[in-house]
């Protein structure tokens, strides 16, 4: 499956990763703060807004809301990456925090504090775990 955030539409859609056909175009509807960042860990589907400062957790199979304010008070989420029971969150403050993917509690809110920037592109726009 392929999940796609519709920034202006306020939805997350589910698509067939081979054919591109919509499985459920409104897998997660009604998001109000421009969903952009997505990550999956087990049956937890994380959706973040770069403008709302929050991460919500949804059921990865059904799209049902599990926890609306999983982690709040973030400063413009730039990217998400999940690995096991860890959720890594890159913020537009050039920091990356590590959170417990089950509870949302910070393990190290400032795991990385000094990301290099380049002129015109001062923020980390992606992160991955390998």
Image (spheres, rainbow, N blue to C red):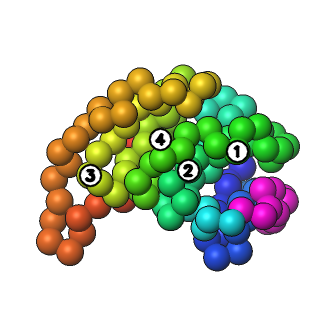
What element does badge 2 sit on?
Answer: loop
Residue assigned mark 3: 94
Range of magenta residues: 20-31
Cβ atoms under marks 3 and 1 closer than 8 Å:
no
Residue assigned mark 2: 54
Which badge, 4 or 1, is on the more N-terminal residue? Answer: 1
What element does badge 4 sit on?
Answer: strand
Residue assigned mark 4: 81
Within 10 angstroms of label 2, few (less than 14), some, or many (20 or more) residues? many
Q: Which mark is residue 68?
A: 1
Q: Which mark is residue 102?
A: none
Towards the viewer: 13 or 79: 79
Which badge, 3 or 1, is on the more N-terminal residue? Answer: 1
In the picture provided, is 8 more to the left or to the right than 107? right
Q: Is residue 24 visible?
A: yes
- Residue 74: x percent and y percent? 45, 48
């Amino acid at each position: 499956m392929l999940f796609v955030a519709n920034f202006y539409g306020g939805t997350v859609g589910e698509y067939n990763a081979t054919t591109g056909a919509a499985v459920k175009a409104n897998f997660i509807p009604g998001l109000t703060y421009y969903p952009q960042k997505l990550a999956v860990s087990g049956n937890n589907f994380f959706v973040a807004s770069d403008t709302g400062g929050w991460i919500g957790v949804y059921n990865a199979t059904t799209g049902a809301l599990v926890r609306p304010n999983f982690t709040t008070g973030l400063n413009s989420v730039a990217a998400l990456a999940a690995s096991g029971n860890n959720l890594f969150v890159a913020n537009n403050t050039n920091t990356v925090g590590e959170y417990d993917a089950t509870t949302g509690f910070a393990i190290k809110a400032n795991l990385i504090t000094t990301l290099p920037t380049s002129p015109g592109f001062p923020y980390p726009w992606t992160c991955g775990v390998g």
